Image: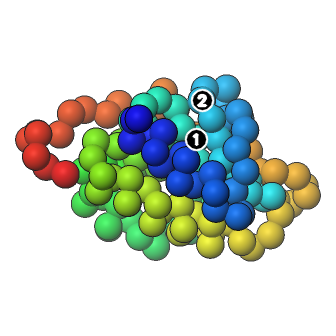
Amino acid sequence: MTLAQRAMEQLEVWPDLSAGPAGCGAGRALSTVHSEIVHFHSDRDVDLHLTLPAIQRIHGDLKESTAVRLVPGSRWVTVHLDCDADVDLLMSLVSVALKAHQTGPSPTGHQARSECNFRRVTVLPRAEAGSC
């Protein structure tokens, strides 16, 4: 079982999340009634819809993580899963994302869709094999 599969299985049982196809057309998504929150694009790459305010609030911590990739102006972050600690980080960030999306439905009353970081981020291997 890959790290992404394990993370998806753990998150699918969270009561506020439901699984379906990713709105970007690549992979599986987990959504709330308000928005798509997580896109699983591969066995290692996951896009997470944190929102701009949440990203700004924890920007320093996100920049320090070797597992997280940021795209300027994006409401999404990419988490690269290389080890168990990265899965733990993803779980914590999904909690942050859920809180950020609790403000209510999008202005149109439908699920908010935004462009995730798929094909906008290049993930390079970490410098050391034991860096997790």
Q: For mark 2, does the 10 Å Cα neighbourhood hold few (<14), some (14 to 19), or many (20 or more) residues? A: some
Place of residue 39 in the rendered image (x, y in percent of width and height, measured from the top left): 58, 41
Foreground: 113 or 48?
48
- The picture quadrant where one finds residue 103 is bottom right
Label 1: element kind? strand
Q: Amino acid at mark 1?
A: His
* Label 1 to label 2: alpha-carbon separation: 7 Å
Place of residue 54 in the rendered image (x, y in percent of width and height, measured from the top left): 53, 68
According to the picture, the residue beneath numbered tag 2 turns out to be 27
Q: Amino acid at mark 2?
A: Gly
On the picture, is 79 further left or further right than 36? left
Residue drawn at the location 38% of the way across and 53% of the way down: 87
On the picture, is 50 further left or further right than 69? right
Foreground: 22 or 50?
22
Does residue 44 appear in the picture of this structure? Answer: yes
Q: For mark 1, does the 10 Å Cα neighbourhood hold few (<14), some (14 to 19), or many (20 or more) residues? A: many
Label 2: element kind? loop
According to the picture, the residue beneath numbered tag 1 turns out to be 39
Asked if 60 appears above or below 129 in the picture, the reply is below
